[in-house]
Image: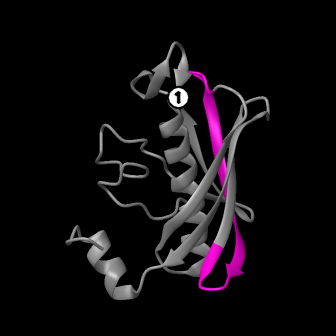
Amino acid sequence: MDRKYTHTSPGCYGCGEDNPEGLQLRPYHDGDWIAADYEAQPRHRGFSRVVHGGVIAALLDEIVTCAASIAMNQLAVTVKIEVEFLTPMLIGKKYVIRARHLGPDGKTHLAEGAIVDEEGKTIARARGRFIELSKERAKQFLNGGQDP
């Protein structure tokens, strides 16, 4: 499949290809959604054959924030995110993380997403609130400056 990938940040834990310990997600456009493929890695294990809940939350946060940023045409950061864990995410299985922007809500924006397995079963879902960074703060943030 010929995909148009969105921009990534090289050292980012979620989407950075230069971060060998990270998730290395490559977000792409999927209609009105932003999506990324993920194969659950042993290094992301919580216990037994299950992905750690913090990693699941990070997967969702990354793609939901990406969807908000693209819709806002500006780098967004998470103010609040709620994750609902529905069923275990298993090591070695392939998943798709999908998210979409829901719209503005006062000074923030809302977005939602889900992780779906190869059979179409929803593993976890999230809903979040995001705020845009000013262009100056975004530049500092992306250039590895002091606290954004």
x 30%, y 38%: residue: 20
- Percent position of residue 143, x then y: 24, 71
Residue 1: tell me if it is visible: no
- Percent position of residue 94, x then y: 61, 30
x 63%, y 53%: residue: 82
Q: How is the image coloured?
A: one colour
Which three-letter amino acid code belongs to the residue tagged 1? Ala
Q: Of helix, strand and loop, which mostly describes the magenta segment?
A: strand
Q: Outermost residue toward the right? A: 120
x 48%, y 47%: residue: 25
x 46%, y 75%: residue: 75
Q: Is residue 100 magenta?
A: yes
| Residue at image mark 1 | 40
Q: Quadrant of residue 21?
A: top left
Q: Outermost residue toward the top? A: 48
Figure check: 109 above or below 113:
below
- Percent position of residue 48, x then y: 52, 12
Q: Is residue 84 magenta?
A: no
Residue range in magenta is 89-109
Quadrant of the image containing the C terminus: bottom left
* Nearer to the camera, 102 or 38: 102
